[in-house]
Image (cartoon, helix red, strand yellow):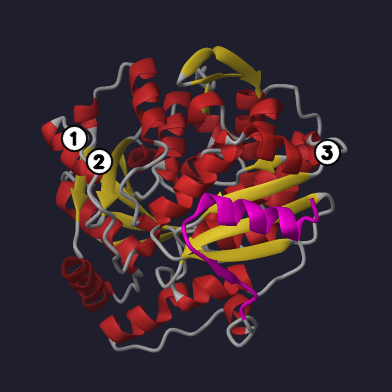
Amino acid sequence: MELFNLKDKSEQVNFATAVKRGIGSNQGLFFPDEIKPLDNIDNLLEMPLVERSQVILRHLIGDEVPELESIIADAFTFKAPLVKADDRIYALELFHGPTLAFKDFGARFMARVLSAVRGNKHLTILTATSGDTGAAVADAFFKQSGIDVVVLYPKGKISELQEKLIATLGGNIRAVQINGTFDECQDLVKKAFDDADFKEKVGLNSANSINISRLLAQVCYYFEAASQLSKAERDKLVFSVPCGNFGNITAGLIAKALGLKCRFVISCNANDTVPRYLKSGKWDPHATIPTLSNAMDISRPNNWPRVEALCRMEHWDLDAFGYGSLNDDETMAAMRELHNKTGYVLEPHAAIAWKVLSSHLKEDEVGIFLGTAHPAKFKADVDKVLSIDVALPEALERRKNLDSKSVTLDPDYTKLKDYILKELNI
């Protein structure tokens, strides 16, 4: 698989190198300049999830990872069921993995690919999270030999149960809460990657959706969603994706480029940089606003350049996207509306995706919104808004009373660098 730095086309790497580097020079993202469509999508959709995913990822990646089929079988050990939530609208429940969020697909795949391609080199994974990425990465890499993980998250801006999944493991997992926003956490990661000496010294890598392996794994569940529909429904498919860093919708667009028939609706919270951009043509990020849907509290989405690159590649017009945004009051109203109507329980991110989809779905279309996290991960808010008592899945129940092992730092790169070097005894 040939990948190019979107900021420097002269930097060309294969898949394994892109996974090990994470990001290119000048903070450029690696991305292919061609995606060849798959043959016979209908036959592919009749396959089970693991077998189909092996075909899709082998088609994309090629022969450079011989263990790819076994990696996929080991990573994708849980289901992604399609559940009827409303008239002509389904929820794709992506929260049945070990950390109850869609990030489990990408993180588990990436962890196993990295182990296969890293050789004897020690790696340090430095990643920023607005909620679910950190938990999935921590779980995927926990106790893996030769790999240390440092997860940055904004203090007080992720749910208590999200934090428990990140900060209670210890061992090779280090949790750092930053006195700032997710964008400031992300800036620290970027500064670390720009520090060539530090990057080489610690074997730096990132597990954010800037890493191409994360994105490619997520392509597979868009096909899984379509496979659970009838042939007639597949031909009129609309996906609504709750968007923060825009990695999830990038994966969906790759699925479309591979031949999956669908269109997309971009669903955002009050951090609505992209909807405003699509409306006005002006890129104007505002200061990040804390919301109930904290995983989407991102004003400068890293993956948007990939979205635009893919649209140029495939000759898709940005005007083809549906889009919309909800504030917190509208999000809570959406949660109540669907619960009162059908009994389906939405957490804030899914509520936004459902409501924006509802306003864009045409009479002859079938909609799927992505349920990116289990409602129990936002238990306090869900219970309060819906006046119910969401039961905790076992994964949360066993962690809820454990003590946090996190440390707190200001958004100061020098302090973060010193902390990591000290922790790694370098």
- In screen coordinates, is 96 left or right of 173? left
Q: Which residue is mark 3?
A: 121
Give the alpha-carbon distance from disc 3 to disc 2, as whole Å: 39 Å
Circles 3 and 2, Cβ within 8 Å, touching? The answer is: no
Give the alpha-carbon distance from disc 2 to disc 1, as whole Å: 6 Å
Q: Which residue is mark 2?
A: 274
Circle 2: residue type: Val
**Going by the picture, which residue comes out furthest to the right?**
120
Q: Which residue is painted at 65% across and 59% down in the image? A: 419
* Whether residue 218 can be seen here: no
Q: Is residue 392 above or below residue 267?
A: below
Q: Which residue is painted at 46% across and 30% down in the image? A: 254
Residue 313: % across, % down: 39, 16
Q: Residues within 10 Å of mark 2 (few under 14, many from 20)?
A: many
Residue 142: % across, % down: 74, 61
**Going by the picture, which residue comes out furthest to the left?**
280
- In screen coordinates, is 22 left or right of 275? right
Circle 3: residue type: Lys
SS for tag 1?
helix
Is residue 87 inside the magenta stretch?
A: no
Circle 1: residue type: Leu
Q: Which residue is mark 1?
A: 278
SS for tag 3?
loop
Q: Which residue is painted at 11% across and 34% down in the image? A: 280
Q: Is residue 387 above or below residue 89?
A: below
Residue 171: % across, % down: 77, 67
Query: Range of the magenta residues?
Result: 404-426
Q: Residues within 10 Å of mark 3 (few under 14, many from 20)?
A: few
